C-alpha cells in the first residue's frame, strides 16, 4: 500500500487527531515547534465535512492549544486545501497532545461520524514540522476579529546549503526584519523546516489586510535603499543564499483562533 492510499484508508484521522495540546502552563511559555497540516480536498462536500468537524471541536481545541489557526488555501499548488497550524513548546508536549485527544470521547465520536461518509474526509494529507527561529515572535491573538478576513502569505525561502540558510538567519536578524516592519510587512512567525520538503528552508507567515496591501508593502520593501544595500552585501558574502521562493495565500476560517 502506498502512502497516498494509506492516508486515504484512515480518512486523515492520524493527522486530525494531533490537534490538541496541554493547556498553557505559564505566560513565559515559548512556542518552539509548529505543525503545519495540509488536508487536500476534492471539489464537493469534503471541505464542508472537515470544517464542520473542526468547528464543532474548536472549544476543546482552543482550550488546550495556545497557538492554533485553521485556514482555507486561496492560492497554492492544490485547491481546495484546509490548512491547520498548531504550536507546541516541545516534542513531549506534542506527543502528549496526541494522547490526550484520543482520550476525549466527544472528539472520537465526531471523528467517527466524519469518517462514516461514502468518501474519505480528505483526498490525501501531509504535514510539515517546523522549528521556530530565535527571532520568531509569539503569535498574539487579535483583540477584535477584523470586519474583513485578512490574507495570510505563507512564504518559504529555499537555500542551497545549511551554511547559506544560516546566512539567511543572520540577514533577517541583523537588518531585514526592521526593513520589513517599516515597509508594512509584519510576519507573525519565522521557522526552519525539521521534517518536510525542499530542505533546507525558512518559512514565515505574514498577515495582510488585503492582497492590495500586500502588493503595496512588498513594493515598498523592494525599493528600500537599505534593503538594496543589505541584499548586495549578503550576495557578496555568501552567494545566492536564497535560490528560490515559494508562496501560498491563506484565509482564516470563521472559527479559527488566529484571525
Image (spheres, rainbow, N blue to C red):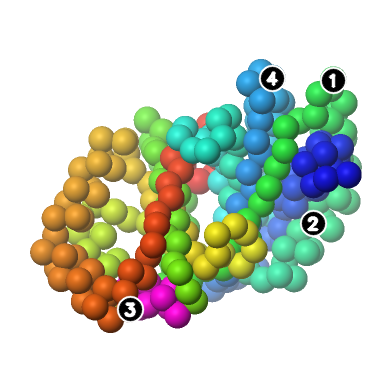
How far is mark 2 from mark 1, CA to CA? 26 Å
Q: Position of residue 21 (x, y in %)?
A: 71, 58
Q: Residue at x 28, y 81 (%)?
A: 237
- Name the residue that disc number 3 marks: 238
* Residue 93 in magenta stretch: no
- Name the residue that disc number 4 marks: 45
Classify 87 as above or below 121: below
Q: Residue at x 66, y 18 (%)?
A: 44
- Name the residue that disc number 2 marks: 98
Label pair 1/4, CB-CB below 8 angstroms:
no
- Name the residue that disc number 1 marks: 118
SS at badge 1: loop
Foreground tag (1 vs 3): 3
How far is mark 2 from mark 3, CA to CA? 41 Å
Q: Earlier in the sequence, mark 1 or mark 4?
A: 4
Predominant secondary structure, magenta span: helix
Q: Earlier in the sequence, mark 2 or mark 3?
A: 2
Query: 79 or 213, which lies in front?
Result: 79
For the N terminus, give its image quadrant.
top right
Amino acid at each position: 500500500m502506498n502512502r497516498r492510499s494509506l492516508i486515504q484508508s484512515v480518512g486523515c484521522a492520524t493527522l486530525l487527531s494531533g490537534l490538541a495540546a496541554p493547556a498553557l502552563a505559564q505566560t513565559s511559555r515559548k512556542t518552539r515547534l509548529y505543525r503545519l497540516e495540509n488536508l487536500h480536498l476534492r471539489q464537493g462536500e469534503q471541505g464542508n465535512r472537515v470544517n464542520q468537524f473542526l468547528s464543532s471541536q474548536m472549544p476543546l481545541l482552543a482550550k488546550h492549544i495556545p497557538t492554533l489557526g485553521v485556514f482555507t488555501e486561496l492560492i497554492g499548488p492544490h485547491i481546495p486545501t484546509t490548512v491547520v497550524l498548531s504550536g507546541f513548546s516541545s516534542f513531549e508536549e506534542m506527543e502528549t497532545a496526541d494522547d490526550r485527544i484520543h482520550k476525549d470521547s466527544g472528539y472520537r465520536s465526531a471523528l467517527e461520524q466524519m469518517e462514516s461518509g461514502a468518501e474519505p474526509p480528505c483526498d490525501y494529507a501531509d504535514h510539515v514540522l517546523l522549528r521556530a527561529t530565535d527571532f520568531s515572535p509569539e503569535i498574539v491573538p487579535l483583540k477584535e476579529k477584523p470586519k474583513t478576513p485578512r490574507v495570510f502569505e505563507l512564504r518559504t525561502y529555499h537555500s542551497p546549503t545549511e551554511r547559506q540558510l544560516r546566512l539567511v538567519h543572520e540577514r533577517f536578524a541583523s537588518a531585514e526584519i526592521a526593513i520589513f516592519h517599516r515597509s508594512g510587512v509584519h510576519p507573525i512567525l519565522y521557522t526552519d523546516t525539521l521534517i518536510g520538503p525542499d530542505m533546507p528552508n525558512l518559512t514565515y507567515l505574514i498577515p495582510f489586510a488585503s492582497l492590495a496591501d500586500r502588493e503595496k508593502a512588498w513594493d515598498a520593501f523592494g525599493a528600500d535603499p537599505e534593503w538594496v544595500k543589505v541584499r548586495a552585501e549578503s550576495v557578496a558574502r555568501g552567494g545566492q543564499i536564497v535560490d528560490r521562493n515559494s508562496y501560498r495565500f491563506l484565509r482564516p476560517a470563521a472559527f479559527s483562533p488566529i484571525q
